[in-house]
Amino acid sequence: MKTTLKILTTLLIVLLISCGGKEEKKKAGFSYDKKETTETKAAPKAEKTPPSKRVDLSNKGVGPITSLELPAEIDQNMVTHGADVYKKMCTACHRADKKFIGPAPTGILERRSPEWVMNMILNPEQMVKEDPLAKDLLMEFNGAPMANQHLTKEEARAVLEYFRTLK
Amino acid sequence: MKKILKSTFAIVALFAALTSCNNSGKSSNSGALSSNNAEKVYIAPGEHDSHYAFISGGYSGNLTVYGLPSGRMFKEIPVFSQFPTNGYGYSEETKPMLETSFGFVPWDDSHHPDISQTKGKLDGRWVFINGNNTPRIARISLTTFETEEIIEVPNSAGNHSSSFITENTEYVVAGTRFSVPIPQSDMSIKDYKGNFKGALSFISVDPEHGHMDIKFQVLMPGFNYDLSHPGRGKSHGWFFFTTYNTEEANSLLEVNASQNDKDFIAAINWKKIEEYVNNGGGKMMPASYAHNIYNDDTHTATSTLKKEVRVVNPSDVPGAVYLIPTPKSPHGCDVDPSGEYIVGNGKLSANLTVHSFTKMLDAIKNEKFAGEAYGIPILNFEDVLAGSVEQPGLGPLHTEFDGKGNAYTTFFISSEVVKWKLGTWEVIDRKPTYYSVGHLTIPGGNSAEPFGKYMFAMNKITKDRYLPTGPEMEHSAQLYDISGDKMELLLDFPTHGEPHYAAAIPAEIIKNNSRKIFKLSENQHPHKALSDADTKVVRDGKNVHVYMTMIRSHFSPDNIEGIKVGDNVFFHITNLEQDFDVPHGFAMIGARNAELLIAPGQTKTLTWKPERVGVWPFYCTDFCSALHQEMQGYVRVSPASSNIELAWSLGE
């Protein structure tokens, strides 16, 4: 028992020293673990685009919205309403331009179809079960589920219009 | 090796069992009849029961919700007792619900639930229940399944002949079991006789919101008012109360209150008294009683102390109150669906006495009185008697009706339910109960239209019915099928606390009204935080208000600094979820109260007084998502003298 402890301690010290060589701050953390994962697992993945960055404009998702044509002109009244709904119902998990609990909506329509966005808002439970992209997103975001906030279709549409202004 | 042997043996045994099954077809132990009964109470996984039963929790102070015919318990609704499971009576919002004129009373003894009615039929809007010990009546919403209102009943003591409602829910009625000096005074107990009074309270119910208000109290002679029921149909407008201790004994009632051959059923013409009161009759007397109302929009209860109550002396309203002699300390006072028959369950009597409402009116009209008590006319027993069920059992307590002309009476001493026929008074069937039955319930059994498919008996003694659990056990109930001529015992199930009475109703009347969430857009809580932008921490002297939100799976903020020893920290937490069945919990290390369980869209407040310097965690108690274990936060507590500024954050 004593020898095992000794070996472990020595190992730990060696590790600490090898880490500490680079930067003092890192001493407190467990950068050793992080290094291991990036070296062995992240390497092959690095070439892949994460689901949140994947562009898939033909996928309409699963849910009540099967077809949605966006007019060229952005409806400003709808944007104001959508911004308000977004602030009340979505900001607990989403920030406009940075990854938070969930992905950032800025530029979303360059990556997703309007139908997909609406279905993700209106029908998240089925989406994360049946839509391949939504499934991947759930994994990318640590299994944090998209909450169904029971927006009406009209509210979800307004949020979508607001997203059109986020660039 | 041993393992291999064992599994080989198991396979052989299984095979043998299967083949033997094939040969014999049916298991020989359970007959065809009992397997048929099993089917009658079997609710397949995922399917719903056909009836709700609201069973009183007795000395738990609460109300439990069961399904019939399965006997499964779905919920315990906190009513008169603090409930750490969800923070009722601990959260700042719900503490006012338990305020009384005696101060904060965190417990009671709940007895008789009764569902609201319209035109004599169960309408499924509310269920009322009485607190027996510190007299109170509660109204529970059957959309939120939460206690919405509690009113204290002054001048009352042992609020037992309660809480029964009239056929349009005009009144919920609360009678006192113990008579007391009114107003209370410092006098010798020996001066009880002639000086103590019994208050029967008629509490009006607002038809739209259900809000309760004591319209008047009838100050009756100093008897014990045991149980009561409303007239209905032809007798609508009357209310009937059983009495015992008409001897007016003040000690050793076991003996001294069992002397008279007959006690009374008090018949109260409340419509007449209502008219008298509406014309200015009665007098306001000083009183002190709490009226507590919970609001679904503010998610907050308020308590108001009321200062006077209207009392009526029965002898001032001629023709409003009569006494009907009824043998031997009657307990239950039950009125049949037509309103004609009033059953007095004389608990020490060999026979069951049934009075006739029509005969009572005739006797009153003919002014045929046998005497008077404190100015109240006493009718002749024989003039009012409709009939007797001869020697049906020992110790009758309560009677319910199936709407097909039959009555079912419980017998405590002989542990049985007896079915008999109204009008002919013949006994049709009897079935044992296990053991010593108190109340029984038929869905709608206390209304003009009972749903006579099931009946269940609630027993006082359990003994060997279940696996033993030490000296204290839950009580047992038995469910019977009463659709045929003979009652059939279907199921035995345990109940929580002491279920005195229960009210049951077909599920379709209420299940579609059951609320799923509270809308954030309707939240009017003064300390709500409806989005991340609203979260903040505000210091007001020693009081620190934390405006916090929760959603799967984080609190915002989840790091708080600048709290000091000696502060009063109020966590005002709003659940931002808008989806069905996503409550979140909140628990703070060392908090000397309870947790909070917060429904979607709701705001609740927990108070915490940090006493030690350090960094202290809080977390969500209700497993809410795959990241539930990550739903946590820290509060840094600094010394009282510290000048660390308040700071709060999430994800920084």
Image (tube, coloured by chain):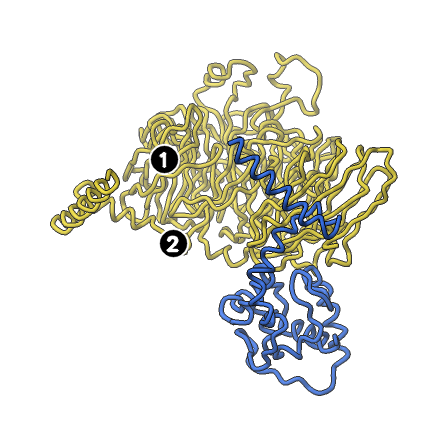
Q: Position of residue A124 (x, y in %)?
A: 56, 67
Tell me, yes or no, whether the two marked residues, 2 and 1, touch with CB atoms within 8 Å: no
Helix, strand or loop at disc 2?
A: loop
- Hue of chain A? blue
Question: Which residue is at a point 25% across and 49% down the rendered structure image?
Answer: B36
**Residue nearer the viewer, B15 or B246:** B15
- Chain under label 2? B
Q: Earlier in the sequence, mark 2 or mark 1?
A: 2
The correct choice, above or below, for B357 with respect to B323 in the image is below
Q: Is residue B11 in view from this perspective?
A: yes
Helix or strand or loop: what does disc 1 sit on? strand
Query: Is residue B365 at least partly visible in the picture?
Result: no
Q: Is residue A37 above or below residue B366?
A: below
Q: Disc number at residue B313?
A: none
In the rendered structure, which amino acid carries the disc numbered 1?
A: Gly
Which residue is drawn at the image coordinates 75% and 76% (left, top)? A167
Which dot marks residue B45?
2
Tell which chain the image draws in yellow: B
Which residue corresponds to the image point at 47% horizontal and 28% vertical from the top-left? B325
Indicate the position of residue B629 as horizontal and vertical percent values.
59, 48
Can you identify the residue that label 1 sits on?
B387
Indicate which label's residue lies in the foreground, 2 or 1.
2
Q: Is residue A165 above or below residue B335?
A: below
- The C terminus of chain B is located in which quarter? bottom right
